[in-house]
Amino acid sequence: MKPQANKAKKPTALILLVALSTMLALTGCASWLPQTGLPWQQNAPSTTETALPQQTETQPLLLETQTEPFQSEAPKELVLWLPAEMDPGADNQAASLLASRLATFAETEDITITIRIKNLSGAGGLLDALTATSSAAPQAMPDLILLARRDLETAALKSLVMPLDPLTSIVDEEDWFPYAHEMSLIQGVVYGIPFIGDPLSLITKAGADTALQAGWQSIAEPGSVFSFPADDAQALLPLTLYMELGGAFSGNQLRPALDAEILLKALILLEEGQQNGSILKESAQWQNFQQSWESFLNGSASRTAAPLSLFLAQYAKTEATPEELPVLLETGFTLSSGWLWALSSQDSESQALSLRLAEYLVENGFLGAWSEAFGRVPARPSALENWQKQTLRMPLMQQSLGAKFLPVNEVMASVSPALRGAVLAVLRDNDTPEEAAKQAVEGFK
């Protein structure tokens, strides 16, 4: 009977074995296995042992498949920083033209343009704000910003704005005044798209004797009285004289050197003008062009040096006939700076959109109308050709074509004080040109 009993028990054992196998499959056999000490299992809770290696292996694959089609969404907002002079909310024609242009672009691109208004320069100005924002809140940096050229140079050297060479070739076009193309470059790299300029100009009063010689060296000739700010911190007029006479800056940017012989020629010219009464005595007291310009308008001088912006502002606010307005004189050479558009955003989509806006704002039709209303010379000849004041086109074209860009900031920081000191030594302190030139040159040694 035992054999029968044994035969009866075998099916039961087989059934139990099948049931046990089924239970193992349903509950997860891994939890029944002994720990083998895999690297990611050391000192880790049992519930996360399988999840951690799966994340480190599969996450990069998910990123690779999603990065290409979803690199970044098209921006819905463009942040634009402008100087207060260009506020599109102001009550004037230039502001209305700019506001309309920005609105059209925003509608075309289906975006919002947020405008921040700041001072052009100085404490709390565009450069200061850009520097502070870069350190404290990089996410609040503007996408597009309009900067004075001297500030653009500083911003570029601090990596606050982006180089444009890889992004656009618009500055390589021929439709730029020579100085405008020069001022777009920082150490040979394009950092800005030129917008407007402001060349230094030689201006005479209405009805003055036009038979008198033009050009900067005429300021010392008898027959007219010339005014300029001799105490100007940039020494823009003596710098112009020096460079027109062929002066250059040897050495390096940190320690530039003046040409003593050419500087002496410039100082002799100024001394002669003072001695024969051709240079207004009060010039030694003035520190900016606004002061000497007001003296010129009041009749104290018959000729003056002034940025074109002052000349154009006089045309914009007066009701006088062209015969009663000041006249530009041909110089053949002058110096100019200006304002340029620059990019601050590092996002590729925002950069592309900002560039489209900058190029839209320098299109010659708009730039011509806006710059005439604003009272600045456009950086493009084709834009100047669109001006309505036909009597101004040719003289402004001549001034702009003959303009060169100012030396770089480091050179100006060294040379300007030396030139200013030499001019004041001659005109105010009655030093000889030889003494003043020698002292200025030795100051660099």
Image: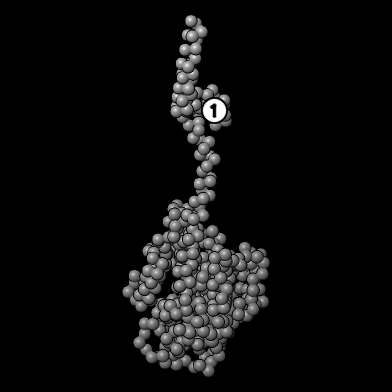
- Residue 121 position, x and y percent, is 45, 65
Q: Is residue 305 above or below residue 120?
A: below
Give the residue at mark 1. 42
Q: Could you say which is closer to the camera, residue 167 or residue 380?
A: 167
Q: Is residue 247 above or below residue 253?
A: below
* Residue 101 visible in image: yes
- Neighbourhood count class around disc 1 (C-alpha, 10 Å): few under 14, some 14–19, many 20 upward: few
Which residue lies at the image location 36% right of the left edge and 78% below the top edge?
93
* Quadrant in the rendering for residue 100: bottom left
Which coloring applies here? one colour
SS for callout 1:
loop
- Residue 442 position, x and y percent, is 65, 67
* Residue 216 visible in image: no
Q: How many marks?
A: 1
Which residue lies at the image location 34% right of the left edge and 76% below the top edge?
92
Please state, as top left, top right, bottom left or bottom right, where the C terminus lies in the image. bottom right
- Residue 318 position, x and y percent, is 36, 85
* Quadrant in the rendering for residue 269: bottom right
Residue furthest to the left? 91
Which residue lies at the image location 46% right of the left edge and 87% below the top edge?
392
- Residue 135 position, x and y percent, is 47, 53
Q: Is residue 6 above or below residue 41?
A: above
Judged left or right of residue 111, residue 204 is: right
Q: Could you say which is closer to the camera, residue 117 or residue 243?
A: 117
* Quadrant in the rendering for residue 173: bottom right
Residue type at mark 1 is Gln
